Amino acid sequence: MATSSVPESESDSSCVGSDYAEIIVLRHGETAWNADGRIQGHLDVELNDAGRQQAAVVGDRLSKEPKISVVYSSDLARAYETAQIIAARCGGIRVVTDVDLRERHLGDLQGLVFRDAAKINPKAHQAFVSRETCQEIPGGGESRDQLHQRCTSSVQRIGNKHKGERVVLVSHGGFIRTLYKQASPDGRSVAKVLNTSVNIIHVYDDGKWTIKSWGDVSHLNPTGYLQSGFGGDEKSG
């Protein structure tokens, strides 16, 4: 459930049809744990300096594009700080936090360096890499089915509320990969979601989703902040 409400607003953007919402989905900026290869999940980790620079650059990019109605964000610090920086660069638009936009809960793997996880907690690691989509991770971790239900229902709810508008959604690698699989015509998975990459989907109220563009990091190329940091792929967290 969203932690605060957003009034219905009219969009002055003629580039969005009245029968869908254009949702600009962004992964948060880089954190020190991304750089170290450490699994975050629901643990609250701040952006590092590179991540703040990434957020500022993507915010500058979005400020030059058609009107954004609102920024939705996971309530975890790395996403929320990214969202706040973007909102400020776009003229101080509203940021709404929503716990349903969090990363997948990764149970007992959270806080571990990924390369050591199989040795330190083989049971949790085996659950994580299992091909069974109903497999939960020991320590309160979500199954892929649970993640899918949470991701798709929350984004459909946001899309239904903002038909005819452009909104930004700041979330996490595992969450965003789930959205791609839902919107992809053949249900394929995407290999990796880079920090502050721009991914745009159209969400219709009949449940149809389409991908307008995916994985755009052109705003980062001149900055030196295009990092190869951990996460955003099948090891996401």
Image (cartoon, grey):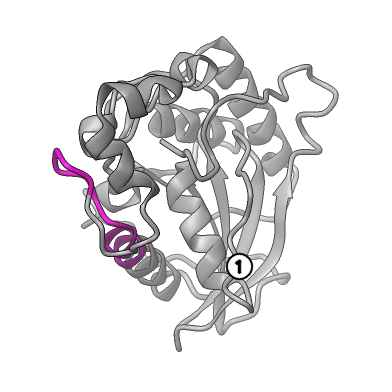
Residue 4 seen in render? no
Given residues 92 and 20, the one toward you in this image is 20
**Residue 160 sits in which quadrant?**
bottom left
Residue at the right extreme, as displayed: 222
At x 56% / y 21%, what residue is drawn?
51
Task: Assess disc 1: are there few (<14), some (14-19) or many (≥20) residues with their C-alpha within 10 Å of its C-alpha.
Answer: few
At x 21% / y 48%, what residue is drawn?
3
Residue 172 seen in render? yes
Given residues 9 and 18, the one toward you in this image is 18
Q: Which residues are magenta?
A: 137-150
- Residue 214 among magenta residues: no
Q: Which residue is mark 1?
A: 188
Residue 213: horizontal and vertical position, in percent? 73, 60
At x 36% / y 53%, what residue is drawn?
130
Residue 4 horizontal side relative to residue 45, left or right: left
Residue at the top extreme, as displayed: 49
Residue at the bottom extreme, as displayed: 206
Q: Secondary structure at mark 1?
A: loop
At x 49% / y 30%, what residue is drawn?
82
Residue 180 horizontal side relative to residue 123, left or right: right
Q: Amino acid at mark 1?
A: Arg
Instruction: State which quarter of the image contains the C terminus.
Output: top left
Instruction: State which quarter of the image contains the N terminus.
Output: bottom left
